[in-house]
Structure formats: C-alpha cells, structure tokens
Amino acid sequence: MATTTCEIAPANPVEQFLRTDRIPHIWCPGCGIGTSVNCFTRALIELDADLDKIAVVSGIGCSGRVAGYLKLDSFHTTHGRAIPFATGLKLARPELTVVVYSGDGDLFAIGGNHFIHAARRNIDLKVICINNFIYGMTGGQVAPTTPVSAIATTTPFGSFEPPFNLPQLAEAAGATFVARWTTYHVRQLTRTIKEMLKRKGFSFIEVLSPCPTLFQRRNKQGDGLAAMKMYKQLSKTRNGAPTAETAIEQGKPIIVGKFVDIERPSYLGSMEQMLSSRLGDRYVHVENLEWH
Amino acid sequence: MITADPKGVLTGAHFIDGDQACTEGCLAAGARFAAGYPITPSTEVVERFARRIPTVGGRFIQMEDELASSIAILGAVWGGAKAFTVTSGPGFSLMMEHLGLAVMTETPCVIVNVQRGGPSTGLPTLPGQADMMQARWGSHGDYEIIALSPQSPQECFDLSITAFNLSEQFRVPVLFMMDEVVGHMTEKVIIPPAEEIEIYPRRLTVKPPEEYLPYAVDGDLVPEMVHAGMGYRFHITGLTHDERGYPAMNPEAQDKLIRRLKDKILENADRIITLEEEGLDSADVVVVSYGITARVAQRAIELARAKGLKVGKLRLVTVWPFPEQKIRDLAGRVRAFVVPELNLGQIVREVERCAAGQARVISVPHAGGSVHRPEQILERIEEAAK
Ligand SMILES: Cc1ncc(C[n+]2csc(CCOP(=O)(O)OP(=O)(O)O)c2C)c(N)n1
Ligand code: SF4
C-alpha cells in the first residue's frame, strides 16, 4: 500500500481549530495575524478548553477576519463594534468565554468608546488586539497607533498625531489584565493568552504585529522577517512595568510583558450583588437567558 | 405557536402610557434582554424594563450609545435571548448600521422608535412620523423590513408581541414605529393571561452539527438558527455569505442571498400585513393613515360621513411591507385617497406609486410637533369627494 504524505507528516495540531475549507486565507506573506492565531489555538490546546463554550467576536479589518477562520462559534460584526456585540453575547450567556479579536483601528478609533466602557464596567471579555500601526484592510491609512513621523497613505509626509499608548489606555479605563507581546514572542504570547483565558475580568493583550505590505514597506522596514529581527532587537521584557512607560516610539525600545493583573468586581457579579441585596427574594436569577 | 411564559405577563387591567405598555408587551413576548441609551420620548420603555426585569429573570444594560445598544441586542440574540432596543430619531439614525447587520445575518430582534420631530435633534418632546422612509430605507443596501405602527397604548402592548413573533417567524429585525403621542398617552391597557398569548418560538434547528448549514433553506425561505454554546461552532458575518455562512465575494452569491432576504418578506406579505379596514366597499374616498394620525383621521371620517360623504378607512397597522395589492385594488374603484401623516409626504408616495394614476392621491402634510386638527383632514376629504 502506498504511504501518503499525511501518514508521514503528523497533522498540524492547530488544524482542528481552523475552518480549513476556507483556506487559503486572505493574509499576506509575512503578516503577523496568522502567527497570533497560532498562539491562540495553541493556548486552547494547552488549556484543553471546552471549545463549544468559547466564542470569538471580531470587528472589521484584516485582523477582523480572525473570527472567520476559527472553527468556534464566531462572529464577524461591524467596524468598531465587536465589543458591544460581545457584551450582549456575554450578558445573555455568561457560561461562554467570549474573546474579542480585532485590529487597533477597529478597537481604538471607531470602537474606542466601546473599549473604555467595557473596561470600566469590567465585563468579562478577553480582548486580543492586533496592533500593526496602520489600517491594513483599507490600504494603509493612519491609525490611532501610528508612530509620529511614520508614513501612511493619509499622512504621506509623516504622521504628526500623537498615538495612543494602548496598555496605559486599557489600564486607565479599568482593564484588570494588560499585557503586550510581539509576534516574535510566540511562546510568551501563548502563555499570556492561556493565562488570560483562565482568569475573569476585562482583559487586554496587545500584539504588535508586522504589516509588511503596507506599514513595513512604506516605512522602509523590510519584510516580515526583518520585522521579527527588529522586534527581537528592540523588545525589552519588563513584567509589571508601569503602563505610563510603555509608549512606543520609532527606533526606541519596545516594552513587552504583563503589566497589569488585578482583581475587581465584575459587571455581572456586581449586578447580581446589587439586585439581590436590594430585591431579596424577589430577585430572579437566571444564568443563561436562552429560551425554548 | 406556544403560549407566553407567565413570568413576563402582568395579567390585568392597567392604566399606563404607550411606552410602558410597550415594555409589558416585550416582556410578555419573552424578551429577557434589552440594551438602550436614554432619549426622549422613548426612555420610559427601558426605565420600566430596568425596573421589571430583575424580578422576571433577565438583564438590562444601558450602553454608551445607540450603536452599542443596537449591536448588544444582536449579541444577546445569538447567545439565546429574545432582545430589543428602544430609541427615538437621533438614536434611530445611529442604529441604521446594525439594522443592516441584523437583516444580513437574519437576527430576530425588535427595534422600537418612539418618533419625535426631526431632522437632527428636532423636537425632542413633540411627535412626528417622519422616520417612516428611514424605517424602510435607512440602512444601506437592498432589503425588506417589517414595521408596525400602533395607535394606542393597548396596541403598544398587543403589537409589540406581534413584532417579536414576526421577527422570529421571518428572522428579520422588526421596527416598532410608535410616536410621542402614543408613547405618552395614558389609557386602559388589558393584559390577558399568559395562556391566551401566542408566541412564535425561535426556529432552532434539530439537525446535528455535521448536517447543519446556517443559511441553507428548503422550501421555506427562512433558515434555521442555532445559538452560541450549543456545539455547532458556526460562523456568521455581515459580509455576503453562502449557505455555510462563509463570505462569498461574487455577484452570484450576492444575487442569491439578497433575493432570498427580500423574497422571504415579499412572498409572505399577505401573512405579515395587518390592516384595519372600514367602509371600504361603498367608499368614494379612502383615508389612509397610521399611528396617532389614524385616530385624528377617525374623527375627520365621522365628520365627513355626517355630511353624507362616502368615506372609507384604511389603517396601516403594518406599514412595511407596504400593502401594495390593497391600494392597487382600491385604486380601480375609488375616486381618491387622502393621506394625512406627521411628515411632509412620505407614505403618500407609496400610495401614489400603487395607485398608479387610477385614483387621485391627496396628501395632508404636517411637519410634526402636534397632531392634525380633524378639520384639516376633513377639508381634504371634501375636496377629494368633489
Ligand atoms: C463604518 C465603517 N467605516 C469604515 C470601514 C472601512 N474599514 C474597513 S477595515 C478598516 C480599518 C481596519 O484597521 P484595523 O482595525 O487597524 O485592522 P487591520 O486591517 O489593520 O488589521 C476600515 C476603516 C468599514 N468597514 N466600516
Ligand atoms: S495588509 Fe497588512 S495586516 Fe492586512 S493581511 Fe496584509 S500584511 Fe496583514
């Protein structure tokens, strides 16, 4: 009997998490989004997570396509609004682990208001933000994360807007878990995603990720591999670093690590507590709002 | 059909306004999740829901804006709840993108718009009916929608149940187009016992995950649904998609999907549309109206009849889909239609389109801020009868 290649090459362990009937995916060679998905799925394997109880919600963008490739309950929503969709999903079905997976423009420009309010409320969402410093999907326009002097199609002579420092923003808004890695740090990222999935509370991981097609190229930073070398060279792991010190500036060290890990009463927990203390026996607790 | 969950049904006779009756209707229909953002004259609906829901079993959240509230309800529906949101003019404008997402993903839900005067901030505390075309066309793209227009607090209760039932039956967002007067007028509202309230259950699939395709249909044009957490590991997207729910970026997939989304409403228009008809058989003139204006028109019709005129009444309980066939049939045998509304001529365009020159169509416009005087409508009925 002929030996097929399948029998020689072991099956890719993350394949079970992917909608393989949708491959090839849309991402460019050297793009970091796929690397982050790999870390995410490996975290699921290592956690031995119940895949029927994990939902992924994305907004719109190259990063927003993640939901569509994951073989989980997955929702590709509207630009900027993954977080409020996820909020409704979580409040209707608290048993789910709800992951929001989207881009920096999606989560912090058009969706910035939703991000800060979900963090303030401490809704139990796990937010993974692909920060490629640019709007990828629409062809490389300036983002709220674009470093000063970087070239984008709508800042053809260099951006002069100050960018957000996302970990600081997340912490200030109330996130209980804040971390940053690059797509060079696959093991650390996998570990941090695992940690995030196990805990409760509004959690945020920023993943610095190359966009060779639109950001790297226009800013003379080479290809995806060159970006990896740059991340390796510039990154400094400082767990617990004050988020005020994590701003990113071109050519300066990139601070990575886990910066915040605290506990705060969750939205659902506080709701339960307030209503049952005020209403006593009249309060009717229902876990999942599913009706038949 | 199943009967209502008694936990949400406040059986009895109540003296409440339309906004509060709407809340009770939504609760009776089984809504256990609402998200909202305060805006006059609609806020009382969610205020009552926030007060009632903890003792019924469900959740309310006040979101940061209407973009958020209109998509939070969609998340809740895919999580298994029946859900609605409530707003007025400016908030309705912000909800349009998610109205489109709900249409595209076939997410059953109800959006209540207690209409006030517009455009922009307009007349926050005063009535209008000027969002009727926005209800029809407000989100981008081609689609069909269902919109109901109650004329009293009792109907705010009854028809909000109908709104939920239609949204579940056809998997489409249903717009509940109230107005400030109906929302704030207090009248007797009878809430029947739960066992007398019929509820259309969610169309959940019984197929196992390996056989289930989220957007496959057979015969009926409405696909079966699943909820997150049920083990189907399904995908939904606002992109044009195929039966698997996967993005399909080509004209054939677009044609197939968009036609089905339209056809599932249009081919069932007869089952969806509710009209109140009176005196149409012998009418020379038919007054076409909806919402609060129908009650003012009722008085005008009575005054005209007292003068010996043959006037019929056609009240659009369902405004969208528009009762095209009804207007066409009438146009062949009546002299004229008179169309009063609290806008400068929106639904009258539909009447004109369907009448197609077969009968005169006379608009009775009003920019909003109050209701018509019956005499204003009477005058136009008299003109039409000449
Ligand atoms: C309401 C709305 N406005 C604009 C767009 C166009 N648009 C699509 S993706 C995108 C930016 C995405 O950038 P980011 O979130 O950084 O994701 P990336 O593509 O870089 O992964 C924009 C502006 C849209 N889809 N919807
Ligand atoms: S454009 Fe950039 S972000 Fe988008 S897939 Fe290509 S490399 Fe990735």
Image: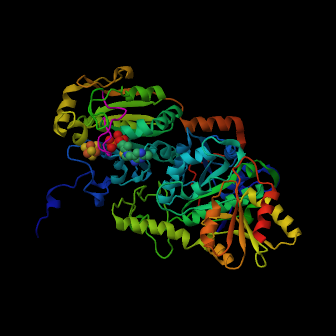
Displayed quadrant of residue A143: top left
User: For residue A198: magenta?
Assistant: no
Work out which residue is located at the far left of the displayed protein and give it: A2
- Residue A148 or residue B284, whichever sits in front: B284
Residue A42 versus residue B364 in the image, above or below: above
Residue lying at 72% horizontally and 56% vertically, measured from the top left: B156
Q: Is residue A76 visible?
A: yes
Displayed quadrant of residue A80: top left
Q: Position of residue B213 (x, y in %)?
A: 41, 66
Q: How many marks?
A: 0
Quarter of the image with the C terminus of chain A is bottom right
Quarter of the image with the N terminus of chain A is bottom left
Q: Is residue A34 visible?
A: no
Segment tinted magenta in the rendering: A133-147
Work out which residue is located at the far right of the displayed protein and give it: B306
Q: Position of residue B16 (x, y in %)?
A: 80, 49
Residue lying at 72% horizontally and 75% vertically, measured from the top left: B335
Q: Quadrant of ligand 1?
A: top left
Report whether A21 appears left or right of A121: left
* Magenta span main SS: loop
- Residue A247 or residue A158, whichever sits in front: A158
Residue lying at 19% horizontally and 30% vertically, measured from the top left: A230
